[in-house]
């Protein structure tokens, strides 16, 4: 296994409920290091660009509306196999299907307001990290 980086977002449902620290504790307990982090409120255009791959899906409009409904916390996580291990600690997209102990099983409100985003491949992680962070902001 190699040391990898992945992009995580703590979504508006979680910042609204003051869960940033609890989510971070789960990430760190899973062995992931938070090597960059910033809180920001996405614009409509930024949310549409970030989720551009989902543009054709029926839930795209709702997803963008949700993602601009409050602040998010964007993060770079680093660790062994970080992409897969973050996906594991996040849990399934629909919290009803998320394994016990995962972030989404513990905190998600719905399939849409599901607390966290995590890159799904190393290739997408590189693109998504560059969307939010410059090299100077990432301190490994
Ligand atoms: P993820 O990789 O587990 O985040 O899931 P996807 O890439 O399939 O979807 C991206 C995001 O869109 C999810 O995290 C949810 O916030 C949202 N989403 C996914 N499926 C649905 C759906 O069926 N309905 C709605 N409203 N939102 C969805």
Image: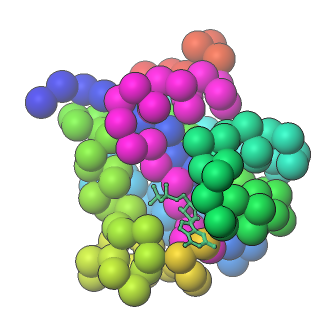
Split into 4 quadrants, where in the image is the C terminus?
A: top left
Q: Residue at x 33, y 77 (%)?
A: 98
The image shows residue 97 at horizontal and vertical percentages of: 33, 81
Q: Residue at x 77, y 62 (%)?
A: 61
Position of 41 relative to 59 (above/below): above
The image shows residue 77 at horizontal and vertical percentages of: 43, 38
Split into 4 quadrants, where in the image is the N terminus?
A: top left
Position of 2 relative to 21 (above/below): above
**How has the structure been colored for display?**
rainbow
User: Which of the pair 106/121 is nearer the observer?
Assistant: 121
The image shows residue 90 at horizontal and vertical percentages of: 38, 62
User: Which of the pair 120/133 is nearer the observer?
Assistant: 120
Q: Which residues are magenta?
A: 113-133
Residue located farthest toward the top when viewing the structure as drawn? 136
**Could you tell whether 73 is left or right of 93 in the image?**
right
Ligand 1 quadrant assignment: bottom right
Q: Residue at x 39, y 44 (%)?
A: 120
Quadrant of residue 113 within the rendered picture: bottom right
Q: How many marks?
A: 0
Q: Residue at x 43, y 68 (%)?
A: 93
User: Which of the pair 58/111 is nearer the observer?
Assistant: 58
User: Which of the pair 56/52 is nearer the observer?
Assistant: 56
């Amino acid at each position: 296994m190699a040391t990898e980086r992945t992009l995580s977002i703590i979504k508006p449902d979680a910042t609204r409920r003051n869960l940033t620290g609890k989510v971070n504790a789960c990430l760190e307990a899973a062995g992931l290091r938070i090597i960059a982090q910033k809180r920001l409120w996405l614009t409509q255009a930024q949310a549409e660009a970030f989720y551009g791959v989902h543009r054709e899906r029926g839930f795209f409009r709702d997803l963008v509306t949700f993602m601009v409904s409050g602040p998010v916390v964007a993060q770079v996580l680093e660790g062994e196999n970080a992409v897969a291990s973050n996906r594991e600690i996040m849990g399934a997209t629909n919290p009803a299907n998320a394994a016990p102990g995962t972030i989404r099983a513990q905190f998600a409100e719905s399939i849409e307001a599901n607390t966290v985003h995590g890159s799904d491949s190393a290739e997408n992680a590189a693109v998504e990290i560059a969307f939010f962070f410059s090299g100077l902001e990432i301190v490994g």
